[in-house]
Image (spheres, rainbow, N blue to C red):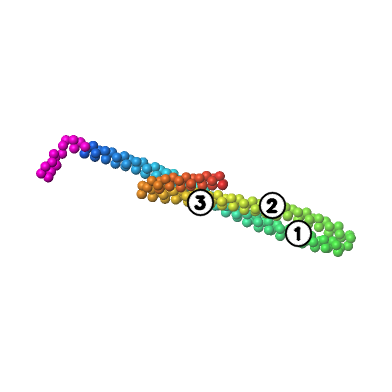
Amino acid sequence: MSGGGFHVHGPHDHELEHAAQGHHDEHAGHGDGAARQATGRIAMVTAMLATVGAIFAYQGGATQAAAGLYKNDAAIRKTEAANQWAFYQAKSTKQSLTELGRDLAPEDKKTAYQGRIDRYEKEKAEIKTEAERHETASRDADAASAAQMHTHHRWAQATTVLQVAIAMAAIALLTRRRWLEVGMWLVGSAGLVLGVLAALHM
């Protein structure tokens, strides 16, 4: 009832206001609970991504070190092959001089010269085999180094993508933007896929 510029509440008005206030508080509490769940979920995923990212970073460092070792071994093998080919050339020069000496020597000396020529020929064959072995080993080491570097790049890509996902998770926690949380899941999944490819050397 109202009159004279003031309003008198009926008994049912108080009940309606109380019910409306209770309904509002219930929804607010429900919203806070959902927000806490989302926050906890994002925090848990962030911790998992950080852990996996640390493993990926370690694997990336390990493959880079392995690539360096293979490259170093390839250089050593290449040097060994060059040394063997230089030795081979020296033997060829000696053989040529000996053949010239045999051609100019009297008949009773030719047999001795021929023996030395045969020895040089045998030594050259052994040196050539050794040089080719080192060349093959050098090529194999180069290929292994390239494969390790490819895997290293995969690990680095996976680590970088996971770092982006973690950054998105941090922004999602601050802004509570649903699309950022979805983006975090998508980018994080992409990082995990890259990690699997790296583990499979693909």
Query: Sequence order check: which comes first, mark 1 or mark 2?
Result: 1
Amino acid type of the residue tagged 3 in the rendering = Ala
Amino acid type of the residue tagged 1 in the rendering = Lys
- Viewer-nearest residue: 119 or 23: 23
Q: Residue at x 56, y 51 (%)?
A: 150
Identify the residue at the far bottom of this view: 104
108 relative position to 68: left or right: right
28 relative position to 103: left or right: left
Q: Residues within 10 Å of mark 3 (few under 14, many from 20)?
A: many
* Cα–Cα span, label 3 and label 2: 34 Å
Instruction: Please state the extent of the stretch shown in magenta in the rendering.
Output: 1-16
Can you give x and y, in whole percent of width and height, for residue 162 in the image?
Answer: 46, 48
Q: Which residue is mark 3?
A: 156
20 relative position to 45: left or right: left
Name the element at disc 2. Answer: helix
Q: Which residue is mark 1?
A: 91
